[in-house]
Each structure stands twice: as structure tokens, then as C-alpha cells.
């Protein structure tokens, strides 16, 4: 049983590949079999992940379910997996959303069905792989590997400008990743210089003190790659194109999970490995986050296409996530992590809803709608619930995340918090205005009068998300508890660095740089400006 | 480790002898067989025999011919690369040659002799012997370039290649002469031992000599600015020959450069900045010009220039890892580049094909598996995990970072990034390109399918389980113990 426990991560990560092998043998004309097989595989993966959740120890510190097998021993690359509270929640988000999109795509994809489902399963493996990797090289491989299926999903099954969007997506992401590769290699050789050992193991790298000068550059390289993914303003320009042109399920998984890979990268790699550099860049990232919040909201307000509006709202929401993270206190970071999950659920649901209306009317322009609450009451109810969750109404998940983030930000810097709070107001503005124009108001277009309300399948897709919206909104404790040890660990590293910097400043005045840290040996070499 | 250099020791060139015998048999008796396929089977038999003999020589370093020929692990791995390239080329050449009505039994003999030349190049530390190997390799290459003798472009390719090749050989020989003048020997081993003394005594001859030798080989591997011949020759030659060109002579050229520069003159500091500049130029020119090519063969020609640039990065870094990472890259490159050319060969073997990128439209609908293979090779060329191309680049970049060449790696990484555009473009066109015409079907033969399987297997295995081959390449460093 202990053996099985340790293999759970490999199982959850690679089980979708089993699905791919099965699908290879199904003839491509048998659409129903393909869909059924994919759904079963995704669902079983979800079950494995629920089992993993149940076996997870909520209070233990450090990584759980660790697996560490050498892979390319000549280069110190090992197959090292492990999760803590943060990755646990992100993996659950991934498995839940993956299962839901299998159901949601049921009638949406008519051509190349086999390729589509194979790409989706491949994507699932790639995403979970990023969240479980504790070896930097392995992390990089999974990070890159999920580009190819996403490229195909956008480029083959997407909207009118799909090829432009797909190529833009790949090029932007690759640019960041390649710089990250150089930074990775630099870390690799730096660690070798420090201990004589060749390894890419993240946990071992945590032990290595890195001088601030080098830290700054390496942090920037990683941060650029992650900033493109999140996306942080001004690296966000790929997002609206990719989101709008992707097929519904593609947008759901893109917004729901792929964007979180960027924020996860910050919290797993940048904060713990480069705490001094993190402290140094708090103002920059916070300001970019606030710009993202306000800019995203303002641009969302003037969008005519609902999907485009939701895409820009993602930029705005993820600005909150980054702001909370860089508040560098418990409330801020916990708010940030829970908001990652919340955004996945709410925005995922929003994209699903947009997809449903598109399937009926083949348009997403707000001007084409109006008064849908009269013809599709159930749909409108779901729409309203999800929109209110996106705004952050109390009792919904959005409130928990936003409140914690604002609390944490206020403790760190009052000005940032006030600016960010205007983002909350703006979110209410554009969301409620959109809601007003789409589902309320006069039902004056004849095409909207006889639309079919939600089918059983569509309800099946939305209900779990709505349940989660209220569960996290009313009783977030189980989720917050599980992430606490991990968040505390990361913040303690940042605090240690903060103390070190403060100490050095006390002794030698402001404007110092820690060049070499041998505090264990009793010396800290510094350099004054 | 004792290397006896007293006897001739014919046994150590057993693989070369096998190939020469096979080639001779084909030349002498090929005309008698009515079914020309027999010549190709003979060639394959010869190649497989050579492969087996080459593998036997692993971990068993031996010298012969008065120390002029040296079969060490380095030579064995390169021989394996050459022979595999030869096998894949022979397999994919037949249907193309038959389709274009240019099949002659001499073709197979030419390939075999060419490989013999390459094997001689990699198995020696004597500059004269390396030169002899180069010439043995080059002449069949000139013939093969012009093999489509009714095609004007092919003739042009052969003549261009011959002229430029002759020039390059002249440079090379002059460089060797200068080195001989400085060191009083052409044996690299003695040059290494007496290096400081020679540098002190006659630096003025040794350094220019080394540069001229480097430039001579630089022509063969298509380093900038010796790359001008590549696009025209690659475009004009018959496609399977182009595939062979892009892989095998390049590997042979690098084997020679590794021997001369990394083994022979590691302490010559003047070389490193020049290598740096050549590496940057080669990568950049290759990548930037590839973007604008509408012809797939020409695009792959420029792309092969760029890949030579990446390997030059490993050479610039020098050090122990240079040999192993360059070897890994060359092995991986052999597989996926030949794979890409195999797919292009198949597409080119249809009436009226000009290997233009527009001809790829609709490929995925008509031949989904072929398009998938093409996509795999394109992703590997671009360096996406988990393919061999990714690990090749990773190892090369690691070595360079380890030796402190951060900016070089950043430039290389940016170049990789740019290259993704034109590799993806092929995938985009084959999958998403819309055309009203029906895609003319490609004929598959068992040989071609075997080629696809071999190259795809190599690409994936080297991409997912790189450890084994990496360990082998690590055992090839100098000195030869």
C-alpha cells in the first residue's frame, strides 16, 4: 500500500497517456467511442487525484508522495516528483477542469475528433507534470511539452484567426522559456561550483545561497518566462488572441490551468530560490500587477465580444493574484493561491457559458443579445452566479480570494491596496454591465426568443463548478489549511532574506548589496553603492 | 595504455575493407544484373557488415599503418553515424532514383566509397591521412550531386560543388603545409606533445596554418562565410543525396575539426575568438535566411547551416564536454534530419514536384501518418522536448554555459527561437494549408517505411532516454584512453 501511495503522482500524471494509447487503436470515424474513452480516462484520473487528496496530510510540512529516480545521471537529471498543498490544489483544479472539458466538447468538435481528444489528454499530462516536478529540468520539459498540444488545439479547431493566434502563443511562450533554459543552466553550474555536485534538483537548490547580483539576473530570466505565461502586463498581448480564437474547451483549459502555470512558477521557483531578488522586485511587480488589474478591467469594459471581455478580465484577475503573492505575507500569498483556484473555476465556467451561447447563436457579440433571462432562465441563472463569483460577491469563492489578497496587500503597502480595490469596483462595472446587456433588458431580437435552455449535459458541466464556487466561498477552510504549511515554508525563506538584508543595512547603512553570504561561517561580504 | 605503432595492422580497417569490397563488387558486376535493385541490396549488405565490424572495435583502441591510422572510441562512434546515414540514404534513394529514371548501379558504389573516405577522416591523427580521407569522400560526393544528369540544376550543383570543394581542398592543403613547416611533422600527436615549443619557435607558420585548415574544413561543414555553395548544391542535387550531404560529410568535417582543433590545438587561444564569431555568424545567417525560403529543400539547406552553427558553439566552448556534446548532437541530427529529408523525398517523387512549400498543403488530410512523422522531425529540428533535437541542443548549450560562454548561449537560444518559425511553418502548411486540388498521393515502399521508422525511433529514443548514448559519447574524449 505504501508502494502504491508513492506511485500516485506518476499515476495521476501519466494516466492520460494510457488514454492516448487506447485511442490510437480506435478508428477515427468512431466519434462516440473516442469521446467515451477520453471521458472515462479523464474521470478516472480525477478519481486518482481525489484519492491523492484524501491521502494528503494537511498539516505535514515539506513534500509528500515523493519519487526520486535518476533519469540522465550523466547530467544529474532525475525523475523527481512531489507535491505540497499548493500543487495539490492546482492538480485538483486540472483534473476537474479536464474532465469537464471532455463533457463540454461532446457536440462541439465535429472534425478531427481523434486528434482533438489526443491533444487534450496530452495537455493534461503536461500540465500535471509541471505541478508535480521537483527537478528543474523535468519542470522545463513538461513546461515546453504542453506547447505542442495547445498549439494544435488552437490552430486546428479554433476560430477565424486561429493560425495567427496559435503561432503568437507559441512564439511568445517559447521566447520566455528559452531564456529560462539559459538561467536553468546557469543555476546548474552554479550549484556545481557550490557543492561539486551536478544536479537539477529543486529541493537541493533551495539550500544554495545565491549572491544578489547573480540572483537578480536569474530571477529576471525566470520571471520573464513566467510573466509571459501569467500574463503580466505588458506581456499579455498573446492572451486575447489565443483565448478568443481557441475552441471553447481550449479557452477553458488555457484560462483555467495554463495561466496558473506562470503564477505557480513564481511561487515554486522565484520566491523560494531568489528571496532577496524577490524583495528587490516587489515594487516593480506590484506596480505591473496593478496596471494589469486596472488596464485589464478598462479594456474589458469596452469589448464588444463576450469572450474577449472574459479574456481581458483574466488579465485583471491575475493581476490580483500577482499582487497578493508579492505582498509577501500569509494572507496575501494564501489569497493569491486560492484566487488561482477560484479564477480557474469562475473564468473556466464563464468560457463554458460563452461557448454554450455561441453554439446556439453562432455569435458572441453583446449587441446581438438582450433579455435572455426570458428565453433561457436556467442559463441566465448560471451566468449570473458565475459572473457574481468573478466579481467577488461574498459567499462566492471570488470574495475569499480577493479579500485575502487585499488584506495582505494593505498590510504591505496601503497605496497598492487602494489602487487594487478600484479594480474590484471596475470588475463589478464591466461584468454587471455585460450581464445587463446580455441577459436582462428587453428581448427585442427575434432570434433570441426561441433558444433552447440548458440541456442535461450542459447542466452537468456547470453544476460541479457552481458547487465549488459556493463551497470555497462559504467554507474555504479545508483548502486554506492544506496550503498553509507550504505557504509558511516559502514565506519563512523570504523573511529570512528580509532579515538578512535589514541586518546588513543596519550595520552598513542603506544601499548595500550582499555579494557573498557565508553567514554560516560567520561572514557576510557586502558591497556599498 | 600502450599503442603499438610498429606494424601495419590491416585488421583495424576491417569495416572500411568491407565497404570497399562491396563497392568494388557493385562496380565490377553491377552491370550484369538486370534488376538494379541487387546493387542496392549489395550495398546494404556491405553497410550492415561494416556496422557490425565497427561496433566490434568499441573500447578497443588500436593503431596501425605506422601510427597514421587510429581507431579509438571517437572513430567508432563517428563510423557508426556515417554507416547509419549510409543505410538510411540507400534505403530511401532507390524509389526516388527509379522515379526520376536516373538509377544506376554506380550510385550505390559511390555512397560506399564516400563513407570509406569519411571513416578514414575520422580515424586518424595524421593531417595527411585526414586529407586523403577528405578527398576520397569528396569525389563521390561531386558525382552524386550531379547524378540527375538530365536536370540542369543537378549539373550546376555538381560543378559548383566541385569548384568550391577544390578551392577548399587547396586551402586545406596549404594550411597543412604551413603546419608541417612549423612542426616538422603532420602527426597531431607529436604536435600536441611539442606544442609549446613549436608555438615559441614558429608561431607565425603554425597559427595561419591552423586557421587555413579550419577554413578548409569549415567549407565542408558549411560554416559561414564558406556556406555559399550550400543552397544551390542542396537544391540541385537529387533529394536523397541532399539528405546524405546534410548529414554525413558534415559529421565527417566535424570529426576532422574536433581532431585538429580540440585535440590538436586546444592551447591555441587565437582560435577561440574566431570560432566564436564563426559560430554566431553561422547560426544567425543560416536561421535568418531560412525564413525567406519558399523551397523546402533550400530551407533545409539553410537550416543545416544553422545546425552546424550550434555544433560550432560546442567547439568554441572546448573542454571535455565539447566532444561528447558535439557527438550527441551529430547523432541526433543524423536521425531527424534524414527523417525530414526522407519525407521530402517521398513528396518529391511525384510528378511535377518542385519541393515547394505550397505543395505540402493538404498533406495531413491525405497522409496523416506521414504528416505526423514530418511534424515530429520538424519539432526535433526546432528543439522541442521530448525529441532528440532538444537534448542535442541542451547538451551543447550546457557545455558552453559551463565553460562560461553565457552570451554565446543566449545568442544560440535566440536563434533556436527564430528557427521555430520556419519549422512550424512547414507543419502549419501541411496541416492547415487549404488547397482545392487533391493532394497527389505519395507512393510508399517497404524501404521508405523502414526509413521513417528508423529515423523516428532514433529521434524519440534519443529524446526520451538520452542517458545510454550520452554515456557512450562521454567515453570518446581525448586522449584516446
Image: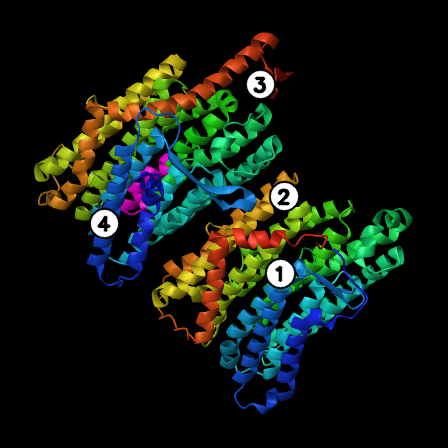
Residue A520's label in the rendered image is: 3
Asked if one can make out residue B73 in the rendered structure from this viewpoint, the answer is: yes
Asked if marks 3 and 4 touch (Cβ < 8 Å), the reply is no
Left or right: residue B75 versus residue B204 is left
- Report which residue position mark 4 lands on: A39
Q: Which of marks 3 and 4 is in front?
A: 3
Rendered location of residue B139, percent (x, y) = 70, 73
Residue B400's label in the rendered image is: 2
* Quadrant occupied by the N terminus of chain A: top left
Q: Give the range drawn in magenta.
A: A244-260
Snapshot colouring: rainbow
Rendered location of residue A10, percent (x, y) = 36, 44
Q: Do labels 4 and 1 share a chain?
A: no
- Report which residue position mark 1 lands on: B77
Between residue B416 and residue A293, name the one nearer to us.
B416
Q: Nearer the viewer, mark 4 or mark 1?
A: 1
Amino acid at each position: 500500500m505504501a508502494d502504491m501511495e508513492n506511485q500516485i503522482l506518476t499515476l495521476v500524471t501519466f494516466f492520460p497517456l494510457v488514454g492516448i494509447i487506447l485511442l490510437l487503436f480506435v478508428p477515427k470515424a468512431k466519434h462516440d467511442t473516442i469521446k467515451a474513452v477520453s471521458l472515462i480516462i479523464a474521470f478516472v484520473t480525477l478519481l486518482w487525484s481525489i484519492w491523492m487528496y484524501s491521502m494528503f496530510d494537511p498539516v505535514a510540512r515539506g513534500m509528500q508522495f515523493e519519487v526520486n529516480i535518476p533519469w540522465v545521471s550523466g547530467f544529474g537529471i532525475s525523475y523527481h516528483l512531489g507535491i505540497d498543498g499548493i500543487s495539490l490544489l492546482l492538480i485538483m483544479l486540472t483534473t476537474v477542469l479536464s474532465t469537464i472539458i471532455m463533457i463540454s466538447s461532446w457536440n462541439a468538435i465535429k472534425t478531427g475528433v481523434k486528434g482533438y481528444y489526443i491533444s487534450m489528454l496530452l495537455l493534461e499530462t503536461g500540465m500535471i507534470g509541471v505541478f508535480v516536478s521537483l527537478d528543474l529540468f523535468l519542470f522545463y520539459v513538461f513546461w515546453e511539452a504542453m506547447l505542442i498540444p495547445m498549439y494544435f488545439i488552437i490552430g486546428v479547431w479554433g476560430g477565424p484567426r486561429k493560425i495567427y493566434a496559435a503561432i503568437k502563443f507559441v512564439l511568445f511562450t517559447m521566447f520566455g522559456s528559452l531564456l529560462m533554459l539559459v538561467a536553468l543552466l546557469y543555476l546548474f553550474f552554479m550549484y556545481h561550483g557550490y557543492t561539486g555536485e551536478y544536479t537539477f534538483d529543486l529541493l537541493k537548490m533551495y539550500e544554495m545561497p545565491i549572491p544578489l547580483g547573480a540572483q537578480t539576473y536569474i530571477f529576471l530570466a525566470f520571471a520573464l518566462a513566467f510573466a509571459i505565461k501569467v500574463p503580466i502586463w505588458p506581456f499579455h498581448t498573446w492572451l486575447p488572441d489565443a483565448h478568443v480564437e481557441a475552441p471553447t474547451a481550449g479557452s477553458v483549459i488555457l484560462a483555467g490551468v495554463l495561466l496558473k502555470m506562470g503564477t505557480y512558477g513564481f511561487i515554486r521557483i522565484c520566491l523560494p530560490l531568489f528571496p532577496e531578488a524577490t524583495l528587490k522586485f516587489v515594487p516593480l511587480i506590484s506596480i505591473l500587477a496593478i496596471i494589469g488589474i486596472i488596464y485589464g478591467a478598462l479594456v474589458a469594459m469596452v469589448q464588444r465580444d463576450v469572450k474577449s471581455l472574459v479574456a481581458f478580465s483574466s488579465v485583471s484577475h491575475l493581476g490580483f493574484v500577482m499582487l497578493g503573492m508579492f505582498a509577501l505575507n500569509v494572507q496575501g500569498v494564501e489569497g493569491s493561491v486560492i484566487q488561482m483556484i477560484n479564477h480557474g473555476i469562475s473564468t473556466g465556467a464563464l468560457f463554458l457559458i460563452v461557448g454554450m451561447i455561441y453554439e446556439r447563436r453562432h455569435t458572441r457579440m453583446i449587441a446581438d443579445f438582450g433579455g435572455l433571462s426570458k428565453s433561457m432562465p436556467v442559463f441566465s441563472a448560471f451566468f449570473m452566479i458565475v459572473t457574481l463569483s468573478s466579481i467577488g460577491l461574498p459567499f462566492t469563492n471570488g470574495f475569499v480570494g480577493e479579500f485575502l489578497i487585499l488584506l495582505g496587500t494593505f498590510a504591505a503597502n496601503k497605496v497598492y491596496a487602494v489602487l487594487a480595490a478600484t479594480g474590484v469596483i471596475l470588475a463589478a462595472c464591466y461584468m454587471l454591465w455585460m450581464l445587463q446587456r446580455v441577459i436582462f433588458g428587453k428581448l427585442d431580437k427575434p432570434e433570441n426568443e426561441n433558444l433552447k435552455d440548458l440541456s442535461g449535459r450542459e447542466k452537468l458541466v456547470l453544476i460541479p463548478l457552481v458547487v465549488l464556487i459556493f463551497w470555497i466561498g462559504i467554507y474555504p477552510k479545508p483548502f486554506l489549511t492544506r496550503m498553509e504549511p507550504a505557504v509558511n515554508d516559502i514565506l519563512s525563506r523570504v523573511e529570512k532574506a528580509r532579515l538578512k538584508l535589514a541586518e546588513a543595512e543596519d550595520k552598513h547603512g542603506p544601499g548595500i548589496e550582499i555579494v557573498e553570504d557565508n553567514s554560516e561561517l560567520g561572514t557576510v561580504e557586502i558591497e556599498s553603492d | 595504455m600502450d599503442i603499438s605503432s610498429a606494424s601495419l595492422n590491416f585488421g583495424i580497417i576491417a569495416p572500411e575493407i568491407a565497404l570497399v569490397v562491396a563497392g568494388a563488387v557493385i562496380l565490377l558486376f553491377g552491370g550484369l544484373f538486370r534488376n538494379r535493385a541487387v546493387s542496392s541490396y549489395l550495398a546494404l549488405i556491405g553497410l550492415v557488415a561494416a556496422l557490425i565490424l565497427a561496433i566490434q572495435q568499441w573500447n578497443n583502441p588500436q593503431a596501425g599503418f605506422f601510427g597514421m591510422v587510429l581507431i579509438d572510441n571517437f572513430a567508432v562512434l563517428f563510423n557508426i553515424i556515417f554507416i547509419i546515414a549510409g543505410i538510411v540514404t540507400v534505403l530511401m534513394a532507390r524509389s526516388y532514383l527509379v522515379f526520376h529514371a536516373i538509377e544506376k548501379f554506380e550510385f550505390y558504389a559511390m555512397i560506399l566509397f564516400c563513407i570509406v573516405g569519411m571513416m578514414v577522416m575520422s580515424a586518424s591523427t595524421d593531417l595527411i591521412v585526414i586529407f586523403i580521407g577528405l578527398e576520397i569522400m569528396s569525389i563521390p560526393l561531386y558525382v552524386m550531386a550531379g547524378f540527375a544528369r538530365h536536370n540542369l540544376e543537378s549539373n550546376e550543383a555538381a560543378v559548383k560543388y566541385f569548384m568550391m570543394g577544390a578551392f577548399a581542398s587547396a586551402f586545406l592543403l596549404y594550411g597543412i603545409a604551413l603546419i608541417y613547416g612549423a612542426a616538422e611533422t603532420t602527426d597531431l600527436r607529436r604536435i600536441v606533445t611539442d606544442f609549446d615549443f613549436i608555438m615559441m619557435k614558429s608561431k607565425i607558420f603554425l597559427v595561419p596554418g591552423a586557421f587555413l585548415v579550419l577554413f578548409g574544413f569549415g567549407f565542408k561543414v558549411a560554416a559561414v562565410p564558406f556556406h555559399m555553395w550550400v543552397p544551390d548544391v542542396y537544391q540541385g542535387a537529387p533529394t536523397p543525396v541532399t539528405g546524405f550531404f546534410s548529414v554525413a560529410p558534415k559529421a565527417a568535417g566535424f570529426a576532422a575539426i574536433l581532431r585538429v582543433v580540440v585535440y590538436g590545438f586546444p592551447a591555441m587561444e587565437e582560435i577561440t575568438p574566431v570560432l566564436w564569431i564563426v559560430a554566431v555568424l553561422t547560426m544567425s545567417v543560416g536561421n535568418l535566411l531560412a525564413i525567406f525560403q519558399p523551397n523546402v529543400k533550400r530551407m533545409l539547406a539553410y537550416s543545416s547551416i544553422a545546425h552546424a552553427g550550434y555544433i560550432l558553439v560546442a567547439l568554441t566552448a572546448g573542454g571535455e564536454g565539447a566532444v561528447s556534446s558535439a557527438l550527441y548532437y551529430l547523432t541526433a541530427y543524423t536521425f531527424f534530419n534524414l527523417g525530414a529529408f526522407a519525407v521530402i523525398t517521398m513528396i518529391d517523387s511525384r510528378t511535377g514536384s518542385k519541393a515547394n512549400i505550397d505543395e505540402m498543403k493538404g498533406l495531413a488530410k491525405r497522409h496523416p501518418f506521414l504528416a505526423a512523422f514530418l511534424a515530429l522531425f520538424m519539432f526535433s529540428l526546432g528543439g522541442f522536448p521530448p525529441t532528440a533535437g532538444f537534448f542535442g541542443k541542451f547538451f551543447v548549450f550546457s557545455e558552453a554555459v559551463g565553460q562560461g560562454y553565457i552570451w554565446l548561449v543566449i545568442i544560440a537560444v535566440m536563434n533556436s527561437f527564430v528557427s521555430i518559425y520556419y519549422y512550424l511553418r512547414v507543419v502549419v502548411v501541411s496541416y492547415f494549408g487549404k488547397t482545392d486540388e487533391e493532394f497527389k498521393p505519395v507512393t510508399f515502399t517497404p524501404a521508405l517505411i523502414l526509413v521513417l521508422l528508423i529515423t523516428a525511433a532514433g529521434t524519440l529514443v534519443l529524446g526520451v532516454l538520452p542517458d545510454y548514448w550520452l554515456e557512450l559519447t562521454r567515453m570518446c574524449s581525448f586522449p584516446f584512453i
